[in-house]
Image (tube, rainbow, N blue to C red):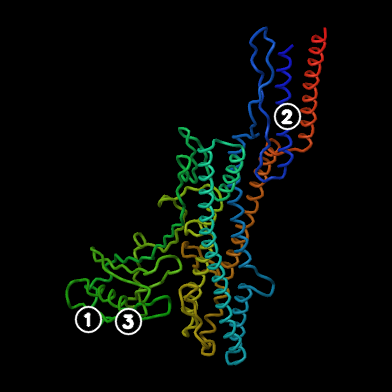
Amino acid sequence: MMDSLYIAQSGLKTSRYAIDVTSNNLANENTEGYKKRVVQTSEVASIRLNIGNGVSFDGVNRTTSPYLYTQILSQNSYSNYYTQQNSTLSSAEQIFKETANSGFSTSLSNFFTAAETLRGDPSSATYKAELNSQSTMIINNIKSIYADLEELQDDNLSLLKDQVDEVNSILEKISHINEKMVDTGESNELLDKRDQLENQLSNYGNIDISTENGNYVLEMGGENLIFNTTSFHELSVKEEYVSQKDIYTTTDLNDTNFSDGDVITLTLNNDISIDITANVSGGTNFDLKQQIVDKINNDSQFGNLQARLDTANNLIIESIEGGEDNIFDLKIDVAGSIVGKDTNVSVEATDNVSVVVYNNELNLSGGSFKSLSENLTSETSEILYYKRALNDFTKAFVEAYAQNSDTTMFKGASVNTFEYVKNSAFNLSGSDLEGISQLQWAEDINIDSRSSEVTSFKEFYKNLLEDVSVNNEDNISLKEAQDAVLNSMTVTYEKLTKVNSDEEMINLMQYQAAYEANAKIITAVDEMLQTILNM
């Protein structure tokens, strides 16, 4: 009989704890990151007759699924990659946005129309003024698009740096939580907070969490960020801007091919043109190359370039500042023939931006870090692809009009160096107009610097607009599919971990009933004891 009292007492105590836990669940139903708590119980082992000695309250656990949790972290990073891509590509699409009456395509058509109209009446001052105006307009429009792309690129770089700071702050918070766990032991509250921070981290990149020899380890992109439970490495943004390097291994520039007094013309960006008078009587066979080196290094008009001869006496000309924004076009004209650089060893200007820890680049498969760094790196950036296309268009446009007119209308080899020769439209002759008017229909122009394909100016720009639109639409489709996967997993996980008020109310009634039943047992035993004592 006395055993029944102890058994009922253990039931009362456990039911009370269960009611407390249920109350706590209901109170935290809307607390962010909170995972439903459940009471853990077990039967107290019997000592005799296999009757049992009551119920043991073994603690309170969180409801979770390590497998689902890991999968959600992974899918969340993929989803945030497409979300960041959507932001970048949508912004780019807005930059290229055109209407029936505005946009670069309209400006280009208006320019072609103005040239054709002037060809019909070459003496009209009104038509000359219109062509003059439209020439300025296309330069302003393409420069505006390019400047907006550069601003988008700068915004992405600034955002990447801000996000790296945010991640470093999250890593510090996780380490601080781990320190508390080391000092006071794991608690459900601390585990919830750490899970919440881990989920935030997965927005930025793919993370892996493990325990090695009892130590908490967190990796992002294959690199350890938190190790030995409480130690962490800070991330940083690494920027590498490779300079364009044109290398001339040809013997066409050797002294034996020249005589003193021969003229070699250097033309930079289809604008600056400087003559060098050969002085090759020294007999070294490399005097002319050295003259080119001296001219480039000492003439302020070549201010962003530097030149030298390597140990094999190859001529090397490179930009002082690296990156695609500092590309240049230098032509070396020898008696009307352009000396070509060696494309096998020459180096293109490139931008390379990555997130690193101790100079080790993160190998990211998802997250906003991956999107931002990709769009700042030449090999993968859509923004830089669009900028290169505009530069190619500009260079081909300038060269086509130079070849088909004796009057120089445009200068430059990139959008940044693109210029209209002021009032040159007023100086065009009839033959100039005949030549340039045909360019609107020409379909044999090689515009893409990375391809030998030919097209027209209108078609090239039309294809560029299509690329901008298709890239954005494709990403939207991928984002929607990925969000559906993530949402499906999240719903399943939240059914398991989030508090359901209806379910908790049912539990509350069950625990209350159990409490009352155990109380009745105690009352019954007490009455039995009183009867015995009164006998």
Q: Which residue is mark 1?
A: 260
Which amino acid type is marked by label 3? Asp
Secondary structure beneath label 1: loop
Label for residue 275?
A: 3
**Closer to the camera, 433 or 61?**
61
Disc 2: CA contacts within 10 A as few (<14), some (14-19) or many (>=20): some
For marks 2 and 1 on the same chain, the one whose residue lies earlier in the sequence: 2
Residue furthest left as drawn: 283
Q: Tag 2's secondary structure? A: helix
Q: Quadrant of the C terminus?
A: top right
* View extreme (front): residue: 534
Q: Residue at x 49, y 46 (%)?
A: 221
Rounded to the nearest whole Å, what is the CA distance between mark 2 and mark 1? 106 Å
Counting from the top left corner in percent of width and height, residue 43 is at 67, 18
Mark 3 residue crowding within 10 angstroms, few (<14) / some (14–19) / many (20+): some
State the mark number for residue 189: none
Q: Is residue 194 left or right of residue 490?
A: left
